[in-house]
């Protein structure tokens, strides 16, 4: 495991309440290119895959989509994947993911989507949720305990908040909770107040309190503060390791998001969300997830 003494020692201190960013997220990522080993670059890339997920989802449905530049893969590369999988089916020529260029769940998702389109089938869960579940499962298999733990934390918080919203508005949570971990299974099936997770997740009481917050922006802030505290605790003894570099990046992303967030728009979205929930809209959870998307 590489050590990054000079890089980390030179980073300005940041705190959760800071409003001025010492770097932009993109600028910091560019800087990391001068320092990280190949192994640690792979860990970094796990975090940017969420932008590629959005691009993949849009590209497969809307070929003229203008991709998010924060992703690593281009539309041309996605088209290469689609064409390869199509040839695999039509000509029985196995698709070869050369040099493991694409994460394997890209293939799983694309195959499922193309097969559903061919059969004109409607998926049991939204495609976005299916892709998200594949992504979390892939990242949680990381051999780096910190990275696997971070993705597990995000998945658990997301599932618990959605399940609580379903419970409040009498919606079927099984249609919205994603993932196949033991925690996801309990959240999906348990009717207990704490989803039978009281002895498993030390941060569960904090998430339950956050769910009671009606102000959407304040709730988001509290979620990020919980994650910030988790990041600090997870790297207490990793001062000059890749984990501390990744933590700095994740903190910058939180700060940048809040620095650019339009408060008025957020409050308006919250009012619209509550209105739709009270009307029992079938799209309420999709709206909830879009407003809580990182």
Image (cartoon, rainbow, N blue to C red):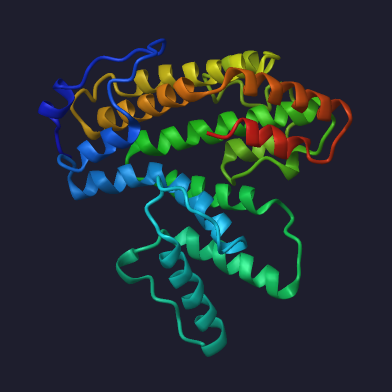
Residue displayed at 14% across by 21% down? 9
Q: Nearer the viewer, residue 128 or 134?
A: 128
Q: Quadrant of residue 75?
A: bottom left
Q: Nearer the viewer, residue 248 or 92?
A: 248
Number of marks present in the image shown: 0
Residue displayed at 71% across by 14% down? 214
Q: Nearer the viewer, residue 82 or 228?
A: 82
Q: Quadrant of residue 112?
A: bottom right
**Residue 242: x, y in percent?**
24, 34
Q: Nearer the viewer, residue 182 or 217?
A: 217
Q: Quadrant of residue 232?
A: top left
Residue 167 seen in the figure: yes
Residue 191 seen in the figure: no
Q: Seen in the image, is 16 located left or right of residue 226?
A: left
**Residue 14: x, y in percent?**
31, 15
The answer to whether 44 is drawn above or below residue 80 in the figure is above
Residue displayed at 71% across by 40% down? 286
The answer to whether 122 is drawn above or below residue 134 in the figure is below
Q: Seen in the image, is 96 located left or right of residue 209?
A: left
**Residue 285: x, y in percent?**
74, 36
Q: Residue furthest bottom?
A: 91
Q: Residue furthest left?
A: 6
**Residue 234: x, y in percent?**
35, 23
- The N terminus: image quadrant: top left
The answer to whether 169 is drawn above or below residue 113 in the figure is above
Q: Residue furthest right?
A: 279
């Amino acid at each position: 495991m590489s050590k990054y003494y000079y890089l980390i020692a030179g980073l300005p201190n940041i705190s959760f309440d800071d409003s001025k960013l010492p770097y932009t997220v993109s600028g910091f990522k560019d800087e990391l290119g001068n320092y990280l080993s190949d192994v640690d670059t792979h860990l970094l890339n796990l975090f940017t895959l969420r932008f590629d997920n959005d691009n993949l989802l849009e590209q497969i449905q809307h070929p003229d989509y203008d991709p998010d530049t924060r992703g690593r893969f281009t539309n041309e590369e996605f088209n290469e994947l689609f064409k390869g999988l199509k040839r695999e089916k039509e000509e029985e020529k196995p698709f070869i993911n050369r040099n493991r260029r694409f994460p394997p769940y890209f293939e799983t998702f694309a195959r499922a989507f193309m097969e559903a389109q061919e059969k004109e089938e409607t998926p049991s869960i939204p495609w976005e949720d299916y892709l998200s579940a594949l992504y979390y499962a892939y990242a949680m298999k990381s051999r780096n305990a910190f990275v696997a733990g971070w993705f597990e934390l995000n998945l658990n918080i997301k599932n618990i908040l959605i399940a609580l919203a379903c419970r409040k508005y009498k919606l079927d949570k099984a249609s919205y909770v994603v993932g196949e971990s033991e925690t996801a299974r309990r959240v999906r099936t348990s009717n207990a107040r704490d989803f039978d997770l009281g002895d498993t997740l030390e941060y569960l009481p904090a998430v339950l309190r956050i769910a009671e917050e009606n102000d959407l922006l304040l709730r988001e802030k509290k979620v990020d503060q919980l994650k910030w505290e988790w990041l600090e605790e997870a790297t207490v003894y990793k001062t000059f390791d890749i984990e501390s570099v990744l933590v700095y990046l994740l903190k910058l992303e939180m700060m940048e998001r809040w620095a650019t967030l339009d408060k008025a728009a957020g409050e308006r979205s919250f009012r619209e969300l509550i209105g739709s929930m009270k009307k029992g809209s079938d799209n309420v959870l999709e709206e909830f997830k879009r407003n809580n998307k990182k």
